[in-house]
Amino acid sequence: MTPFTNVATYDYVIVGAGIIGLTISRELKLRDPDTRIAVLEKEPMPAYHASGRNSGVLHAGFYYTANSLKARFTRDGNRMLRDYCEKYGLDMNRCGKLIVAADEEELRGLEELKRRGDTNGVELHWVDEVEAMAIDPNAKTFRKALYSPTTVTVDPQQVCETLWRENERNGVHFYLDTPFVDFVDGHVHACGGELTLRCGYLINAAGLYADKIAQALGFGRSYTIIPFKGLYLKYAKNKTDIRTNIYPVPNLGNPFLGVHFTKTVDGGIKIGPTAIPALWRENYKGFSRFRLSEFLTILFYEAKLVLTNSFGFRRLAIEEMKKYFRSNFIRLSQKLARGVDPEGFGEFGRPGIRAQLLHKDTLELVQDFVIEGDHRSMHVLNAVSPAFTCSMPFARYVVDEVEEKRRVVKEEDLL
Ligand SMILES: Cc1cc2nc3c(=O)[nH]c(=O)nc-3n(C[C@H](O)[C@H](O)[C@H](O)COP(=O)(O)OP(=O)(O)OC[C@H]3O[C@@H](n4cnc5c(N)ncnc54)[C@H](O)[C@@H]3O)c2cc1C
């Protein structure tokens, strides 16, 4: 008798129950309701990390160059998730978004965003100062602003919970508190080796640990994840002080959008997120989840980035670290809106950490999504913002790639 005679058998094992793992398993079930799927999640619940700790903004799709996966998926993802929220009666705040300029130079930045939006087929309108104030009386801009009517906010935890339950109803097995260990000879081992599953195909959607899992299976060797921490401050004084999402013109040289006002689904207001270089992957607070080996590797790469100043890392790191000081953080938000009381901010909210991919040779932050795999496994690397918005079309793309890799091998076997 082989040691694995009685183990459960799955066509697919997915590692990670964030929005990416959840939408991939949903997509697989939509294509074949009989396919057997297990999702392994190391935490006691899905969406414990980035998917449940983000701004909850369904972006419209004008930040990204037309040749990128992000541009392809943001516009469609926004529509698909809005439809999904409507279908299940989930909370949505359809307040839109203003992107405001501080000066002449930023106006040129807005023009670039408008060009990208037009190329990507995204609805985006120029508004003058008076029109901007009609949308949000407190918005501050230099001459003109852009208004995006299709930007909405959702409750990311509610969306993930709904996807989780839908997957369960469709027969997907969730193994919570179950850290993946390895995938050898068609068998997945988890929970320190206590659990073994027979697995036809592995999909790695492990967020902050996706690079580690990929590398153990021979993929993603050119990359490492550098975590960036996103802090938020809640504005507790008066919900009507801000009426829409208000964003600055971002530095398009890095993947972060700058401190902005988010209108949450319940009409609340928060500022953030920061993009502070973190020192280990789940470096949320104090020394919790500290891992020495991660700390040393991340320190090594961050030191390299400081020395080479790749993508202006030194300035980025200094500017971001300053946001640990509330007064500085608040001051940045005041560039976007008047009438906001600096004393009206509460404590820092629940932080989120971006699993940002760094190319180890070029020392550049990878801006677009990356997937790598073969006929046995597929690895989702760099599912950074706005991967929440993009998740449904991105899941389609991942599943198309998986099917293609498996088809090619089947055809080769027949030859
Ligand atoms: C501060 C912040 C703000 C953001 N704002 C927005 C926004 O407004 N709009 C937007 O579209 N996007 C936003 N994003 C991006 C978005 O949240 C992420 O791109 C998305 O959630 C990534 O999903 P994921 O499933 O890849 O990762 P995750 O949500 O991190 O899920 C990965 C899962 O894998 C699990 N896992 C890891 N290792 C293992 C293992 N060994 N075994 C089993 N399980 C494992 C983890 O526990 C985790 O649950 C934001 C992100 C951050 C951090």
Image: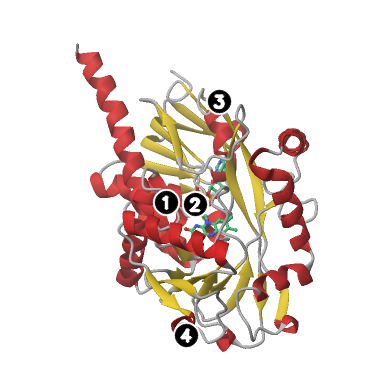
Q: Mark 3 points at which residue?
A: 221
N-terminal label among 2 and 3? 2
Helix, strand or loop under label 3: loop
Rounded to the nearest angstrom, the CA distance separating label 1 from label 4 is 43 Å
Q: Does the residue labelled 3 lie within 8 Å of ligand 1?
A: no
Mark seen at residue 22: 1
- Please name the amino acid that badge 1 sits on: Leu
Local crowd at mark 1 within 10 Å, few (<14), some, or many (≥20)?
many
- Please name the amino acid that badge 3 sits on: Arg
Residue 150 position by quadrant: bottom left
Q: Is mark 2 within 8 Å of ligand 1?
A: yes
Rounded to the nearest angstrom, the CA distance separating label 1 from label 2 is 6 Å
Residue nearest the viewer, comparing 409 with 149: 149
Q: Does the residue labelled 4 lie within 8 Å of ligand 1?
A: no
At 54% from the left and 40% from the top, the residue drawn is: 366
Question: Considering only vertical position in the picture, is 143 above or below 68?
Answer: below
Q: Is mark 1 within 8 Å of ligand 1?
A: yes
Q: Name the residue under label 2.
A: 18
Question: Considering only vertical position in the picture, is 236 above or below 220?
Answer: below
N-terminal label among 4 and 2? 2
- Please name the amino acid that badge 2 sits on: Gly
Residue 74 horizontal side relative to residue 321, left or right:
left
Q: Name the residue under label 4.
A: 130
